[in-house]
Image: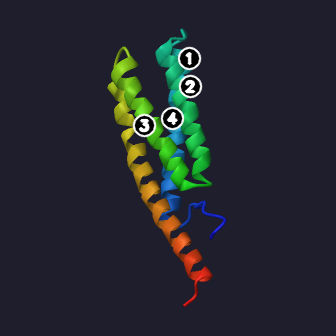
C-alpha cells in the first residue's frame, strides 16, 4: 500500500492553472478591499462575503499541496458564492455568481488533472508492490 497519496501539482498545464488562479486571487483581494471600504456597515451579505474569501484562501493554500482537496474546497466556495448571489445579495447578486465561473472552470480542470495524477501514483505503487 502506498503511504503518500497526496498529489502535488506538477506539469506545465497545472503550473499555468496555478498562475491563473493566483491572478484571480489577487483580483479577488482587490474586490474584498473594495467591499471593505465601500460598504461600512456589516450585514449578512458582507459577513458571508468575507467568510467565502477565507474559504477561497484555504482552497488556494491547499492547492499547492493537494489539488483534489483544493478542488473540493473551491467547488464548495462556488456553491457558497451562488447561494450568496441568488438568495442573500440585495442588489446585483448575479455579479459574483458570474465572476466566479472562470474559477469554477479552472477548478474542474485542476480536479481532473489531480485525479489523473493520483491514479498514476496509485498505479505506480501497485506495480512496485506486485512486480510481474
User: Which residue is outermost to the bottom?
Assistant: 132
Query: Is label 2 in a helix, a strand or a loop?
Result: helix
Q: Which residue is drawn at the image coordinates 60% and 48% (left, top)?
A: 62
Which mark, by number, is residue 37?
1
Q: CA distance from mark 4 to mark 2?
A: 9 Å
- The front one of 8 and 129 is 129
Which mark, by number, is residue 33?
2
Q: Is residue 91 left or right of residue 118?
A: left
Q: Quadrant of residue 85?
A: top left
Please state, as top left, top right, bottom left or bottom right, where the N terminus lies in the image.
Answer: bottom right
Residue 130 location, x and y as percent? Answer: 58, 83
Residue 33 location, x and y as percent? Answer: 56, 25
Q: CA distance from mark 2 to mark 3?
A: 20 Å
- The front one of 114 and 53 is 114
Q: Which residue is drawn at the image coordinates 53% and 40% (left, top)?
A: 25
Which mark, by number, is residue 78?
3
Please state, as top left, top right, bottom left or bottom right, where the C terminus lies in the image.
Answer: bottom right
Q: CA distance from mark 4 to mark 1?
A: 14 Å
Whether residue 30 can be seen here: yes
Question: Tag 3 or tag 4, which sits nearer the N-term?
Answer: 4
Which label sits in the foreground, 2 or 3? Answer: 3
Q: Is residue 72 left or right of residue 91?
A: right
Q: Which residue is drawn at the image coordinates 56% and 17% (left, top)?
A: 37
Whether residue 96 can be seen here: no
Query: Is label 1 in a helix, a strand or a loop?
Result: helix
Query: Is label 3 in a helix, a strand or a loop?
Result: helix
Query: Is label 4 in a helix, a strand or a loop?
Result: helix
Pointers 2 and 1 in contact (C-beta within 8 Å): yes
| Mark 1 surroundings: few (<14), some (14-19) or many (≥20) residues within 10 A | few
Residue corresponding to mark 4 = 28
Amino acid at each position: 500500500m502506498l503511504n503518500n497519496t497526496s498529489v502535488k501539482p506538477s506539469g506545465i498545464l497545472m503550473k499555468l492553472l496555478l498562475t491563473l488562479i493566483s491572478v484571480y486571487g489577487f483580483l479577488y483581494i482587490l474586490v474584498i478591499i473594495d467591499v471593505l471600504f465601500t460598504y461600512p456597515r456589516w450585514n449578512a451579505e458582507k459577513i458571508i462575503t468575507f467568510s467565502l474569501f477565507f474559504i477561497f484562501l484555504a482552497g488556494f493554500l491547499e492547492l499547492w499541496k493537494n489539488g483534489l482537496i483544493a478542488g473540493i474546497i473551491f467547488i464548495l466556495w462556488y456553491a457558497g458564492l451562488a447561494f450568496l448571489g441568488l438568495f442573500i445579495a440585495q442588489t446585483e447578486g448575479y455579479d459574483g455568481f458570474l465572476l466566479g465561473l472562470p474559477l469554477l472552470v479552472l477548478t474542474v480542470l485542476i480536479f481532473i488533472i489531480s485525479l489523473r495524477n493520483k491514479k498514476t501514483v496509485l498505479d505506480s505503487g501497485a506495480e512496485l508492490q506486485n512486480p510481474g
